[in-house]
Amino acid sequence: MITPTLPAGPAGPPEVSVPAPVTAPAALPAAVPGAGQAWWRNAVIYQVYVRSFQDSDGDGIGDLAGVRERLGYLRRLGVDGVWLNPFYVSPQHDHGYDIADHCAVDPVYGDLAEFDALVQECRLLGLKLVVDTVPNHCSSQHPWFRAALAAGPGSPERARFHFADGRGPGGSLPPNNWRAMFGGPAWSRVTESDGRQGQWYLHLFTPEQPDLNWRHPAVAEEFDRVLRFWLDRGVDGFRIDVAAGLFKHPELPDSPDPDADERTRDSVNPLAWNQPEVHAVWRAWRAVCEEYTAKDGRDRLLVGEASVPTPAEQAKYVRPDELHQAFFFHLLHAPWDLDHFRTVIAGALEDIAATGSTVTWVLNNHDQVRTVTRFAGGDPVLGPARAAAAALLMLALPGAAYLYQGEELGLPEVTDLPDELITDPIFHRTRSRVGIRDGCRIPLPWSGGRPPFGFSPEGATAQPWLPQPEHFAAHTAERVLADTGSFWHLYRDALQLRRSLPQFGEAAVRWLESPPGVLAFARGEGFVCAVNFGDGPAPAPVAAAPLLASGPCPPGVLPAATAAWWIHRP
Ligand code: BGC
């Protein structure tokens, strides 16, 4: 368990009028053992959005063979493993989060033989492989849902979903007032086999993603089979979609704040999310993982997307017999603000680490505006500087970190896609660009000066599935690898230091006194990280030249929008 030294006050570091030189703490906390030293505790995992990573066959869509081609690149970057977004058979209404067959690869991404080859190659390169799993809902094309439609009201086939009669005259109104996360009511009405308008079914996302009824034993049995299928093929773990979902209030009553989910695009309806029954599922899944570990000694990982209101609530998901980890999304939503960063980091260290798990930090993923754009505040120079500083901060913290493909290239969000090219169901259901996700899912630029920038092979027959802007030329892997001042080198150097410095591992964070606008902390013997959130230069907390900095950083000075790491020699 990590025992952080927390700030004395409720939020924000103590502000000192004269910037005090840092006295690196004399007493060193011993490395605190957690639940063993499983690989995932402090791992850096690279998220591959398969569709946009590398197209190997020229159809304009990334695929598993493309991922395999680029594993060497990821090894060079220095990550510990890879998480693949869903590549299963799917009509792609939500790009794979609408699964029609959980145990088969969608032909657009490859096949099981290709998946097996990927597993082998990851093993050879020493990379862990984590796959996505989506237990809250499936595709409306899933055989269970098709059977449910065909079988009619009251059938055992319908019992695996949430079917209900409507309210009002002729049952023409949804069974309750819940709204879907991606817009519109959380219920859709079916046409029964006799052609009449019939029952309604629940979907917390799109109508093409019917929610499964986890109170039905067949659902748990099916997911037990799915987990074992992929574990038998050699995966190291699962990222669990919508891990605070699954169970709904048994009576499906009206919500007191029906628009909350749609308004916040977060799982906040207390009747639809975070029901206590869900924890038994995670205990069962953990037992399956332990069973495999007992057989071959390899630690497996369950990392949950558990969006719940507070870190304290999230901590329940990572109790020792439940999920190993849960994404800590508060940095993903944080503005560029010192107090905000410090408060959420301190909260995470306190609440999550107290469970024996480690915090799972995230700054970017396939659902959010990229940090280069998010932190810019409209300033194209500040955005990259702040994004690089935030990355160096995240990578200095104890716990695991997830990197989203392209953040090591310094990619900005693409915000000017024409309406007709937008594929995100959020846009099509809300007719609003708020929260749409195509802009962070643009196919990666690898090389060359023009689209497809090596994303598709020479002679490809199709354009990339989303257009790459010309300015991606400045961000190709080829370019950033050749530029030692690039994001890529910053990430690579940070990852190397994380692996090799003895201060990393489980050493706790100790907040340091720092000048206004600067967040600073120490870990282990003499490691210091500081970030200048302010608008002007600040005195550096350590006089010596930094070990690594997110931008130009002369000795003794910490420029604005810059983070740096030092080893402080007393
Ligand atoms: C995934 C999204 C997906 C949604 C529905 C999420 O939280 O990250 O990309 O659209 O679940 O499955």
Image (tube, helix red, strand yellow):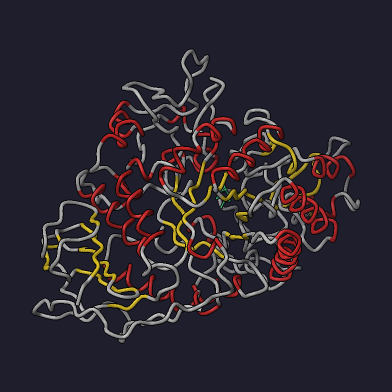
Residue located 42% across and 75% down the image? 347
Residue located 20% across and 69% down the image? 518
Residue 87 visible: yes
Q: On the rendered structure, is 259 left or right of 361?
A: right
Residue located 46% across and 16% down the image? 458
Compared to residue 43, the image places residue 54 above or below, namely above
Compared to residue 299, the image places residue 229 above or below, namely above
> Residue 362 appears at what percent x and percent y?
44, 57
Asked which quadrant contains residue 557, the reply is bottom left
| Along the viewing direction, whichever of 305 and 227 lies nearer the viewer | 227
Q: On the rendered structure, is 462 left or right of 271?
A: left
| Along the viewing direction, whichever of 245 and 343 lies nearer the viewer | 343
How many labels, in total? Answer: 0
> Residue 258 appears at what percent x and percent y?
58, 62
Residue 173 visible: no
> Residue 187 appears at what percent x and percent y?
68, 51
> Residue 314 appears at what percent x and percent y?
55, 71
Q: Which residue, as the protein is rendered here, is positioned at the far left?
A: 18
Q: Quadrant of the C terminus?
A: bottom left
Compared to residue 187, the image places residue 471 above or below, namely above
Asked which quadrant contains residue 296, the reply is bottom right
Residue located 39% across and 47% down the image? 369
| Along the viewing direction, whichever of 249 and 361 lies nearer the viewer | 361
